[in-house]
Image: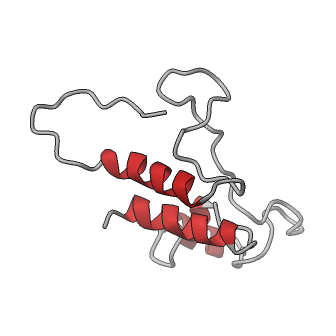
Amino acid sequence: MSQTIVLFMEKYSAIKSGKEPDLSDYKEFKLKEDNIGFKMLQKLGWNEGQGLGAEGGGIVEPINKAPQPVANLGLGAAAAEVVNSEDDEFDAYRKRMMLAYRFRPNPLNNPRRPYY
């Protein structure tokens, strides 16, 4: 099963159970000790969990990039497969299938358009 679909199901089950889903990219792409930037920050006196800056009062969490427009639909348009707390079982199934459609074989390289 695709990693994207697994993440979708994690978000859906977290929303349905009333928990706040972990939407941060930081969870997946956390810097490790072998990263050059991590080593540079440690040489400058930074420790994990501290804020940036001379007094450690700067930001602690990494900056997430701004949402990008979806398939030239315009600013603020949301992807159709995003799970909401109002979704029932059928909506979740439909959105999961829309997401899975992207990963189907496409031998003729036909353009993929989103379902609505």
Q: Quadrant of the N terminus?
A: bottom left
Q: Nearer the viewer, residue 23 or 92?
A: 92
Image quadrant of residue 11?
bottom right
- Locate residue 93 relative to residue 24 in the image: left or right: left
Position of residue 72 relative to residue 61, above or below, is above
Residue at the far left in the pictured view: 107
Q: Residue at x 66, y 50 (%)?
A: 64
| Towards the viewer: 78 or 52 | 78
The percent coordinates of residue 28 (x first, y second) are 51, 68
Q: How is the image coloured?
A: secondary structure
Asked if residue 51 is positioned above or below residue 102 in the image, the reply reads: below
**Residue drawn at (50%, 21%) of the image:** 72
- The total number of labels drawn is 0
Specify whether 12 is left or right of 99. Answer: right
Q: Nearer the viewer, residue 33 or 30?
A: 30
The image position of residue 59, as x and y in percent, is 80, 60
Instruction: Name the one closer to the observer, 116 or 35.
Output: 116
Question: Is 93 drawn above or below residue 108 in the view shown?
Answer: below
Residue 110 drawn at (x, y percent): 19, 28
Residue 106: image location, x then y, percent: 16, 40
